[in-house]
Amino acid sequence: MSAALAEFETVVLRRDLPEARLEAGDVGTVVLAHAGGAGFEVEFATLAGETIAVVTVPAEDLRAVAPDEIAHVRRVA
């Protein structure tokens, strides 16, 4: 599924990235695709629009959102 991700697509993180204060399940936006979809630059932001992190993430650590999912709120550590 990750190979089909496109720039500006909403994605879900599959694993924790503690160095960036991100947890599996956090929702971000693809801002750049690398090497034909091998990895992606993804922006993660608060619901108020404040950027928390922009990180390079391997394709296998992301997935597209599903149409039957709902966002869940957590405080950023």
Image: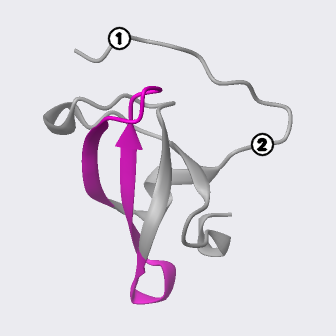
Please tell me whether the stretch drawn in magenta is mainly helix, strand or loop.
Answer: strand
Q: Which residue is the site of mark 2?
A: 66
Q: Residue at x 73, y 24 (%)?
A: 70
Task: Check the image and name the residue furthest to the right.
Answer: 68
Q: Position of residue 63 (x, y in %)?
A: 60, 52
Q: Vertical placement of 72 versus 60: above or below?
A: above
Q: Position of residue 52 (x, y in %)?
A: 26, 37
The residue sitting at the bottom extreme is 36
The amino acid type found where label 1 is placed reads: Arg
Question: Residue at horizontal 37%, vertical 28%?
Answer: 23
Residue 15 in the image: above or below residue 39 = above
Question: Going by the image, does 12 lie left or right of 75?
Answer: right
Q: Residue at x 35, y 11 (%)?
A: 75
The residue identified by callout 1 is 75
Between 7 and 2, the one lying in front of the other is 7
Residue 5 in the figure: left or right of residue 29: right
> Please, is residue 6 above or below residue 69 in the view?
below
Q: Nearer the viewer, mark 1 or mark 2?
A: 1
Q: Position of residue 3 (x, y in %)?
A: 61, 74
Mark 2 belongs to which amino acid?
Answer: Ala
Please indicate whether residue 43 sits to the left or right of residue 17 in the image: right
- Please give the range of residues in magenta: 33-56
Location of residue 59 with respect to 17 vertically, above or below: below
Secondary structure type for disc 1:
loop
Mark 1 closeness class: few <14, some 14–19, many ≥20 residues within 10 Å: few
Whether 52 is among the magenta residues is yes
Precedes in sequence: disc 1 or disc 2:
2
Q: Secondary structure at mark 2?
A: loop
Q: Is residue 76 magenta?
A: no
Give the residue at the far left of this rendering.
Answer: 19
